[in-house]
């Protein structure tokens, strides 16, 4: 990779290099490192989101290359998603080169299928015998015979790192033959044996440097000096670099380094074995240095590794409130996983903060258990503690989907404001605003959002929360453009503080939903890849439902039916595991929609019956939950009835629900219901009325670019849309609506269908009079090939009555035969 980098730079390609380590599984660290690397490629772009920055760099068209080394250390789902998003932004001018000891989980299958991936496996990278000979004789200048080189090559099986390690040790050997006799061919044995042999051959000062600094994740000269009393750390660091002792640059500016993973594991094991009493002292020295330089996170890490809980708690007590305000829940959660509740005795504020961290990283169940234990030992409260505890109950109840209890709990908590904790007060106002919006109390919700912005003005997390909720209210009202701007702003608020992704999941999933509605499918997918793992950790019910539903729909649109259904099985299992029946019912509901799209009404009806959990849907009936604004059990049943021709009662039910939505300001839901009404009218033999209703929906949707709301209703609705488009006036005129025409064109193109000419739509609105439900039922029987006698038996009429109905049907349709009647009725979407 170094050779390739040099070659590219000689060819005028701008490059950047980032060597990853285990600490980069902290997304905060990874994002900061990527920003620093990209700053080398394009000055002034480092404050942007790395994926967005790479997209901007790619748009410039200048050749650039980013090198990522030691990718195998990444395992955190959110960290992996960050790299996946980078890969998605690549084009011909931007390339990423990655080195990994195993196949990285970066979702490379798509790049492989497109022919955009060049892979070099271990087999490709092994030295041939001639290359081993050239390296040892010319590169390392060792005096070895052909037999000795062949023996070493065979034992190492062409593994370059092992040959390199062996060459380091061979250079120190007086009796090469004897050394080779003791040489092992096992990869693990080779690495351990050579590491020990290399260490033993170093001067004492270098050995001490290697062992004592092995406790550090990053080798920075000042902190190395703090661990090496009486020694010159600068000279020793240079000696280690010159001797190639498994040290690599950890940053783009060559100021910090790290040891090779295998080597540092060995060094730490050797340090613990040979100098066990020094290990905690070294960690404490490192902790003190980081603390004195206002770097609390590594200071706490080293205090915990030293086993000094008192020092760790003292440091944590100082910095935890600030980290909480920044939304650093994952970092806090990692520490509280190590520090038991018993050790928090006497640290009342830390105990409360531990519940917050647990809630946003491990979910509501574990947080509730921790809160119960804390309350059992409640004593005297410090002022800021009241705020933390006051906010927790409404937060917990909301995430647990217990809105009936959460709303009164929020009102009771609000009555106790203000407390001495402006951050907690701001979060409470936001949480209460969300709960009130769910209850349909939008005016109160907006007032609380203003209060939240004032209370938590200095907290990035509170700002993100407030902006997200403002976007949510706009989205439910059908103001998509405003919603997208709000969600984007919410993410930018926390990105600018290098915040980790735990809190961002709230805004990230909502932003993905809004982009999906705009039909920005790639953008929605990228956001879901990053934020869904975090949303699943936290357990936000609506976010989990929406994320799974959109992922399922994206898979269906890509033709991956198995993945579409598999994603819903995943949601169902999460619901069972978390004891959230709304997730289970929602998975079945979405599965019914997929069955209907596949022309399988029986399967859809079965899934709707399975999804009809009366307790779930009665609880959501009067709540404004984003996950069910356009998809709930009522809409599911209405859609099935209309698709299968049972349109009589459907129009009445749709009208009642539309009126209810209008009174609640739920405009997106009302639009979906009006689309279903349009289809119901069409299938009732009232195409003119259907077009009138559809026209109103499309004009309103076109103003905000609402796309998936229409597209996801399936082919029957899109046939009406294409028919409506074909009836629009051609060219500019006083009556034409350019916004609507552009929207219709985009909508039809997104459906994958060609433009429908008006002349192919004869009879669109020329029915002499509408067909009755009985006549439609008889038409469906005719379409199935039934005889008059069979039809009479199915509809409960005589042969004579059936013949009368058929004459009336032909008259109304202007048809001259049964076959022509079926063809015309299908073209008009009267029957399927």
Image: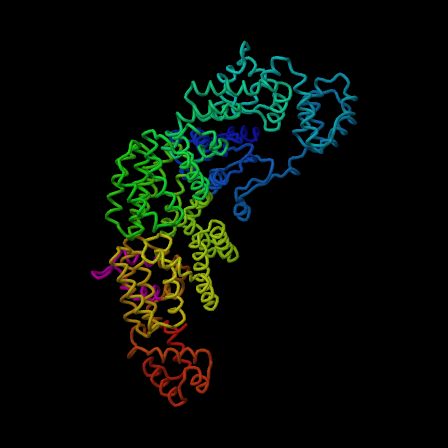
The answer to whether residue 601 is left or right of residue 700 is right
> Hey, which quadrant is residue 69 in on the image?
top right
Asked if residue 57 can be seen in this view, the reply is no
**Relative vertical location of residue 693 with respect to residue 459 in this rendering, above or below:** below
Asked if residue 717 can be seen in this view, the reply is yes
Image quadrant containing the N terminus: top right
Q: Position of residue 337 (x, y in %)?
A: 49, 34
**Relative vertical location of residue 22 with respect to residue 281 in this rendering, above or below:** below
Q: Position of residue 400 (x, y in %)?
A: 40, 47
Q: Nearer the viewer, residue 359 or 523?
A: 359
Count of numbered circles in the view: 0
Q: Residue at the far top: name it.
A: 230
Q: Nearer the viewer, residue 24 or 577?
A: 577
Image quadrant containing the C terminus: bottom left
Q: Is residue 233 magenta?
A: no
Q: Position of residue 217 (x, y in %)?
A: 52, 25
**Relative vertical location of residue 400 with respect to residue 815 in this rendering, above or below:** above
Part of the protein shown in magenta: 720-745
Q: Position of residue 640 (x, y in %)?
A: 40, 67
The answer to whether residue 812 is left or right of residue 69 is left
Q: Residue at the far bottom: name it.
A: 800
Question: Which residue corresponds to the image point at 65% horizontal and 38% vertical from the top-left?
Answer: 124
The answer to whether residue 565 is left or right of residue 439 is right
Question: Which residue corresponds to the image point at 40% horizontal and 76% vertical from the top-left?
Answer: 823
């Amino acid at each position: 990779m170094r050779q390739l980098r040099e070659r590219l730079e000689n060819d005028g390609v701008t490059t950047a290099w980032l060597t990853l380590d285990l600490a980069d599984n902290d997304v905060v660290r990874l994002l900061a490192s990527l920003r620093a690397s990209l700053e080398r490629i394009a000055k002034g772009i480092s404050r942007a989101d790395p994926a967005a920055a790479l997209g901007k760099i790619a748009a410039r068209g200048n050749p650039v290359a980013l090198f990522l080394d030691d990718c195998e250390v990444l395992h955190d789902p959110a960290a992996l998603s960050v790299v996946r998003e980078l890969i998605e932004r690549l084009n011909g001018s931007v390339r990423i080169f990655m080195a990994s000891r195993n196949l990285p989980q970066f979702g490379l299958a798509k790049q492989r299928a497109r022919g955009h991936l060049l892979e070099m496996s271990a087999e490709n990278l092994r030295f041939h015998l001639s290359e081993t000979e050239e390296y040892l004789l010319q590169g390392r200048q060792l005096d070895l015979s052909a037999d000795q080189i062949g023996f070493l090559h065979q034992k190492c099986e062409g593994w370059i790192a092992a040959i390199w390690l062996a060459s380091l040790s061979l250079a120190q050997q007086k009796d090469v033959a004897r050394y080779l006799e003791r040489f092992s061919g096992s990869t693990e044995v080779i690495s351990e044996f050579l590491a020990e042999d290399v260490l033993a051959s170093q001067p004492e000062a270098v050995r001490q440097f290697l062992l004592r600094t092995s406790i550090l994740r990053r080798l920075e000269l000042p902190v190395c000096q703090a661990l090496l009393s009486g020694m010159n750390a600068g000279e020793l660091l240079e000696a280690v670099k010159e001797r190639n002792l498994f040290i690599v640059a950890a940053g783009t500016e060559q100021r910090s380094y790290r040891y090779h993973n295998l080597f540092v594991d060995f060094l730490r094991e050797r340090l613990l074995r040979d100098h066990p009493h020094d290990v905690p002292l070294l960690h404490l020295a490192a902790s003190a240095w980081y603390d004195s330089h206002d770097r609390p996170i590594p200071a706490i890490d080293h205090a915990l590794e030293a086993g000094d809980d008192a020092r760790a708690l003292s440091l944590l007590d100082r910095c935890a409130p600030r980290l909480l305000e920044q939304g650093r829940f994952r970092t806090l959660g990692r520490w509280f996983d190590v520090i038991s509740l018993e050790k928090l005795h006497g640290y009342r504020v830390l105990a409360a903060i531990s519940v917050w961290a647990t809630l946003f990283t491990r979910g509501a169940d574990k947080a509730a258990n921790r809160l119960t234990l804390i309350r059992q030992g409640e004593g005297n409260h410090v002022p800021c503690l009241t705020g933390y505890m006051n906010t927790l109950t409404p937060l917990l109840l909301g995430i647990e989907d217990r809105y009936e209890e959460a709303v009164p709990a929020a009102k009771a908590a609000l009555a106790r404001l203000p407390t001495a904790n402006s951050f907690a007060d701001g979060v409470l106002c936001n949480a209460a605003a969300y709960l009130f919006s769910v209850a349909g109390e939008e005016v109160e919700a907006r007032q609380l959002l203003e209060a939240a912005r004032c209370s938590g003005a200095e907290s990035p997390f509170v700002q993100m929360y407030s902006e997200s909720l403002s976007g949510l209210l706009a989205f439910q009202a059908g103001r998509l453009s405003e919603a997208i701007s709000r969600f984007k702003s919410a993410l930018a608020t926390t990105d600018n503080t290098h915040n980790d992704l735990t809190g961002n999941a709230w805004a990230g999933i909502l932003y993905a939903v809004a982009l999906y509605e705009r039909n920005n499918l790639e953008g929605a997918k990228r956001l879901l890849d990053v934020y869904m793992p975090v949303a699943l950790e936290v357990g936000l019910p609506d976010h989990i439902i929406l994320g799974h539903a959109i992922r399922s729909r994206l898979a269906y649109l890509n033709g991956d039916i198995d993945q579409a259904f598999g994603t819903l099985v995943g949601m169902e299992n999460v619901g069972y595991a978390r004891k959230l029946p709304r997730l289970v019912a929602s998975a079945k509901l979405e599965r019914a929609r997929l069955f209907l799209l596949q022309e399988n009404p029986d399967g859809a009806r079965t899934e709707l019956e399975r999804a009809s959990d009366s307790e779930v849907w009665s609880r959501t009936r009067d709540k404004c939950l984003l996950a069910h604004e356009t998809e709930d059990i009522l809409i599911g049943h209405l859609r099935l009835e209309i698709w299968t021709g049972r349109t009589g009662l459907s129009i009445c039910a749709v009208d009642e629900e539309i009126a209810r939505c209008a009174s609640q300001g739920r405009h997106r839901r009302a639009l979906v219901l009006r689309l279903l009404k349009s289809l119901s009218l069409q299938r009732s033999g009232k195409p003119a009325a259907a077009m009138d209703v559809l026209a109103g929906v499309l004009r309103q949707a076109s103003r905000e670019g609402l796309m998936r709301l229409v597209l996801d209703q399936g082919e029957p609705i899109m046939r009406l849309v294409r028919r409506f488009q074909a009836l629009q006036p051609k060219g500019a005129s006083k009556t034409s609506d350019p916004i609507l025409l552009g929207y219709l064109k985009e909508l039809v193109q997104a459906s994958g269908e060609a433009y429908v000419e008006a002349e192919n739509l004869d009879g669109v609105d020329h029915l002499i009079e509408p067909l009755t439900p009985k006549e439609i039922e008889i038409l469906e029987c005719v379409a199935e090939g039934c005889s008059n006698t069979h039809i009479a038996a199915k509809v409960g009429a005589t042969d004579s009555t059936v013949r009368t109905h058929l004459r009336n049907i032909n008259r109304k349709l202007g048809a001259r035969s049964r076959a022509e009647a079926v063809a015309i009725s299908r073209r008009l979407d009267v029957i399927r």
